[in-house]
Image (tube, rainbow, N blue to C red):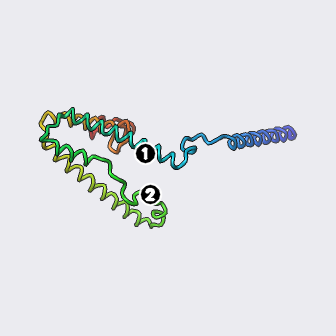
Amino acid sequence: MNTLRKTLLTGLAALSLGGAMIGAQAQAQAPDTHPKAQLSKEERQAKRAEFMAKREQMHAQRVARLHDELKITPAQESAWNAFVASMKPAQRMAGEHGDRAAWAGLSAPQRAAKMIEMQKQRTAFMEQRLAALNTFYSVLTPEQKKVFDEKAAQMQSRFGRHGEHGGQQNGGQQRGDTARG
């Protein structure tokens, strides 16, 4: 009985070792199939530039479509232009994410203070956007306000509060379905 057990354990150990070696060999021979791993730094930068250009083109199309749907008059054009300029994505703030070594060298209270400062900068930026929105909204007619409100609600449900696609948040509920509305 003991001999059978030893033989069985030895066989299982040999099988496990062989399977592990085959897996390691296959892993060593398999090329890295991740698309980014095969691109040089210059190729990645070129792809990013292409993506950003396409993104900017789509943004310009959405802005033009909204301009047409709102039927902006020449008298409203300056407020429209200020509003559109304020809605451009913000450039990343200096030191916000980039220098990991600098962040790693900070103490916990220093990191917390830096995060609060970045949040204050984001809040100031959002307040500037709100001021431009209020100025623009004040020159709209009631019909234009209705169209603008509908389009803004569609964008918020589509991208969510923080830009998530699909409007999913709060455990998968649609933003319009929550109590906050």
Amino acid type, residue under disc 2 in the picture = Gly
x 74%, y 40%: residue: 22
Q: Residues within 10 Å of mark 1 (few under 14, many from 20)?
A: few
Q: Position of residue 56 (x, y in %)?
A: 35, 42
**Judging from the image, what secondary structure is the residue with disc 2 in?**
loop
- Image coordinates of residue 96 in percent, x first then y, are 39, 58
Residue positioned 22% across, 49% down in the render: 130
Q: Of residues 82 and 136, which is closer to you in this image?
A: 82
Q: CA distance from mark 1 to mark 2?
A: 19 Å
Q: Residue at x 12, y 35 (%)?
A: 142
Rendered residue at 22%/36% (across/down): 67
Which residue is the site of mark 2?
98
Residue type, mark 1 in image = Ala
Q: Residue 171's spot in the image, x, y percent?
A: 39, 39
The answer to whether residue 68 is left or right of residue 20 is left
In the image, residue 52 sits, relative to residue 154, either above or below, namely: below
Badge 2: how crowded within 10 Å, few (<14), some, or many (20+)? Answer: few
The residue at which mark 1 appears reads as: 49
Element under disc 1: helix
Q: Are marks 1 and 2 in contact (CB under 8 Å)?
A: no
| Disc ID at residue 129 | none
Where the C terminus falls, by quadrant?
Answer: top left
The answer to which image quadrant residue 69 occupies is top left
- Visible in this render: residue 145? no
- Residue 3 sits above or below residue 90 on the image: above
Quarter of the image for residue 9 reads: top right
